[in-house]
């Protein structure tokens, strides 16, 4: 299995799920990861990082949180 890489940080679970759905509709596997006190992060396989970032940038507002590594 490919290593998962964080591509976005969401403010809450709903936002994370929306990003996950958006990525999955673009054909990109995405997982949500959340720690007890951490924000929700959206992670994708390493080879899909660039496509995932492009999909999120194309379909979200520029001011939304797009995490850089």
Image (cartoon, helix red, strand yellow):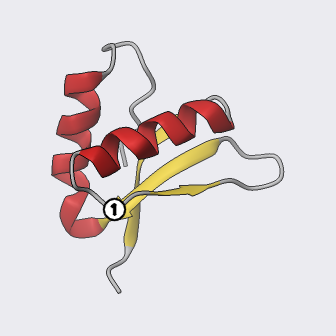
- What is the x, y in percent for residue 19? 43, 38
Q: Which quadrant does the N terminus fall into?
A: bottom left
Question: Residue at horizontal 44%, vertical 46%?
Answer: 20
- What is the x, y in percent for residue 49? 24, 55
Question: Residue at horizontal 41%, vertical 43%?
Answer: 21
The residue pinned by badge 1 equals: 29
Instruction: Report the front residue among 34 and 67.
Output: 34
Q: Where on the picture, by quarter, is residue 58?
A: top left
Q: Where on the picture, by quarter, is residue 65?
A: top left
Question: Residue at horizontal 73%, vertical 46%?
Answer: 38
Q: Residue furthest right?
A: 36
Instruction: Indicate left or right for 44 with 39 as reference.
Output: left
Q: Where on the picture, by quarter, is residue 57?
A: top left
Q: Residues within 10 Å of mark 1 (few under 14, many from 20)?
A: some
**Above/below status of 4 relative to 19:** below
Q: Secondary structure at mark 1?
A: loop
Instruction: Indicate left or right for 69 with 37 as reference.
Output: left
Instruction: Report the front residue among 43 and 30.
Output: 30
Q: Residue furthest bottom?
A: 1
Instruction: Report the front residue among 65 and 27.
Output: 27
């Amino acid at each position: 299995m490919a290593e998962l890489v964080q591509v976005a940080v969401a403010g809450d679970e709903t936002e994370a799920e929306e990003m996950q759905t958006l990525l999955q509709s673009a054909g990109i596997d995405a997982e949500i990861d959340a720690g007890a006190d951490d924000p929700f992060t959206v992670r994708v396989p390493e080879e899909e990082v660039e496509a995932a970032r492009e999909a999120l940038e194309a379909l979200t507002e520029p001011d939304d949180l797009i995490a850089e590594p």
